[in-house]
Image (cartoon, rainbow, N blue to C red):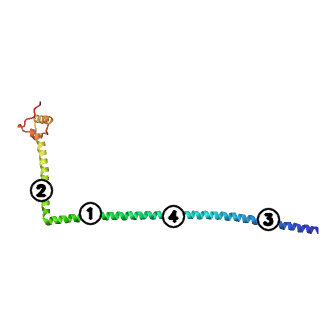
Amino acid sequence: KEYKKRQVEIDKHMEDMRNRSSGEWHERTKAAGDIMMATARSHNSKIAAENDFRVARWKQEAEKMEARLSAQKEEKALSAREHGMRQRARTQKFFDNKQMLDEAKESGKHSEACETQQRLDELTRAKAAFERDLGQMTREEFNSMSKLEELKWQHAVKKSPVPVVRSDLGSAKIPLPSAP
């Protein structure tokens, strides 16, 4: 009887121990699960925060890109408008000049202006030819001078208050300036 009592008592203690250890195990398991869930929630919230940050950054970059593209479009449109205005001004100037030319042709002033311009061009060509011929004659005259005439000419150039042309000294009729 005592043995049975003892056995019942031991069984009761064993049952209590099992229940206690089972409860502790459940508590430990629950605590570990809670820790894991907290870690997972923290990890998930961190991932969600990173995703939100990325999405916000992408939206910002998209807005910046849209702003940049719209600014470029506006700049391009402005440039095109300015180019169009310049082109219209050139075209208008061309047509104004053409109209003035047509009016001058009709009134006869154009032919007078053309003749005047042609005369001016002829005079300019004649002057250039004369200067070229004069330079050639002066070179020839200087090359044909005797040594004495060349020295006289150099002396006159150094002493003369006014510029002396070489052809002036070629003839004997022109006296050289006397030294003081």
Q: Nearer the viewer, residue 22 or 135?
A: 22
Residue contact at pointers 1 and 2, CB within 8 angstroms: no
Residue 21 marker:
3
Q: Residues within 10 Å of mark 4 (few under 14, many from 20)?
A: few
> What is the three-letter code of the residue carrying label 1?
Arg
The residue positioned 81% from the left and 67% from the top of the image is: 19
Which residue does the image show at 69% across and 63% down from the upper left? 35
Indicate the amino acid at tag 2: Arg
Mark 2 and mark 3: Cα distance apart in space:
129 Å
Report the Cα–Cα distance between label 2 and label 4. 76 Å
Query: Residue 102 location, x and y as percent?
Result: 17, 66
Q: CA distance from mark 1 to mark 2?
A: 31 Å
Q: Residues within 10 Å of mark 2 (few under 14, many from 20)?
A: few
Query: Where does the N terminus fall, quadrant-wise?
Result: bottom right
Mark 4 / mark 1, whichever is N-terminal: 4
Residue type (three-letter) at the residue carrying disc 3: Ser
Q: Which residue is mark 1?
A: 90
Tag 4 residue: 58
Task: Tell me, for residue 139, which label it has, or none.
Answer: none
- Circle 1 packing at 10 Å, graded few (<14), some (14-19), many (20+), is few
Outermost residue on the right side: it is 1
Structural distance between the alpha carbons of marks 1 and 3: 101 Å
Q: CA distance from mark 3 to mark 4?
A: 54 Å
Sooner in the amino-acid sequence: mark 3 or mark 4: 3
Snapshot quadrant of residue 14: bottom right
Instruction: Label 4: state its secondary structure.
Output: helix
Dot 2 corresponds to which residue?
Answer: 119
- Label 2: state its secondary structure: helix
First along the sequence among labels 2 and 3: 3
x%, y% of residue 3? 93, 67
In the rendered image of this protein, does residue 157 appear above or below residue 78?
above
What is the total number of numbered labels drawn onto the structure image? Answer: 4
